[in-house]
Image (cartoon, rainbow, N blue to C red):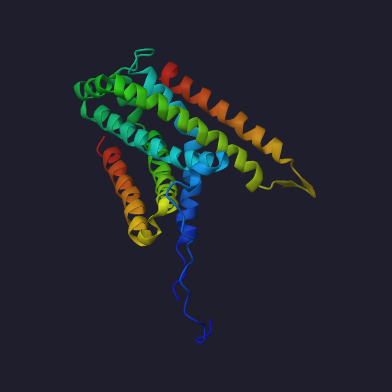
Amino acid sequence: MARSNEPFWWILFSVGGVVAAFLVPVHIVIFGLAVPLGWVSLSHAKLLALLGQPLVKVYLFVLIALPLFHWAHRFRFLLEDLGLYGLRTPLAVLCYGSAIAGTVATLWVLIHV
Amino acid sequence: MSDARPQRPGLYYPKMRTTWWLSRPGYVRFMIREATSVFIAIFLIEFLVLVHAVAQGPDAYAAVVGRLASPGWIVFNVVALLFALYHTVTWFLLTGVVQVVRIGDQQVPPALIVAGAFGAWVVVSLFLLYWIVVRS
């Protein structure tokens, strides 16, 4: 009998949840509200300089990729809870697959800076 | 593992209506908590697009910021912020239940762990605000 792969996804869910809890609100405030509404001005040159730092890239990878796995886990069970338990396996593949795709996209963006 | 082990029985799912979670406030809060992850994920993809635009150049960056200034995105980001804060609060409150910290034989009171998480969150957020907006 195959062992459950649940613990692996659960750990990603859990770590992603911690990252999201600590870091996401302040980024929504800065980049989702303050910058677009003109409360603060972050010049392109400043941000590009930040992006050029390897540690900032690692930080951004953690910030974006891990909460995607947190989303995948919660969304999968959200859909199951709404009655889609017949689609258990396809939903799992779709959700975790999307998170993996997002992780690859994040890596791609950060490497091509 | 023995070969005589019976095959794994099928999982039992009780038949429930799609709207079962509307029947109690606690269930609604549970579903809201689960839904926070959707808003967080959409914001992070939006944020990744912004990072990509910065990498592409000043014009691309200005274009994305301009798009994010549209009423639709501002409303979305306000809603996303509320959901993200709900996630933060519920996550930290759960931390007090899940994470047992012992010093010697003494268990640290859960309320202290929750307070510590909130304190650390405020410090981290203020530091990032300073580091990104003021210092950079």
Name the spot of residue A95 as percent of width and height, x first: 35, 51
Residue positioned 47% across, 32% down in the render: B84
Q: Nearer the viewer, residue A24 or B105?
A: A24
Quarter location, residue A102? top left
Specify the farthest residue to the left.
B59
Residue B76 at x, y percent in the picture: 36, 27
Query: In terms of image quadrants, where is residue B54?
Result: top left
**Which quadrant is home to the C terminus of chain B?**
top left
Which percent across, then down, holds residue A109? 27, 38
Picture quadrant where residue B46 is located: top left
Most extreme residue toward the bottom, as rendered? B4
Say if B77 sits above or below A18 in the image: above
Residue at screen point 34% across, 21% down = B74
Residue in the foreground of this view, choosing between B88 and A54: B88
Q: Nearer the viewer, residue A86 or A95?
A: A86
The residue under the point 53% across, 43% down is B23
* Residue A62 x, y percent position in the rendering: 42, 41
Q: Residue at x 29, y 29 (%)?
A: B50
**Is A3 situated left or right of B77 in this image?**
right
Picture mark count: 0
Vertically, is A78 above or below A52?
below
A21 sits to left or right of A96: right
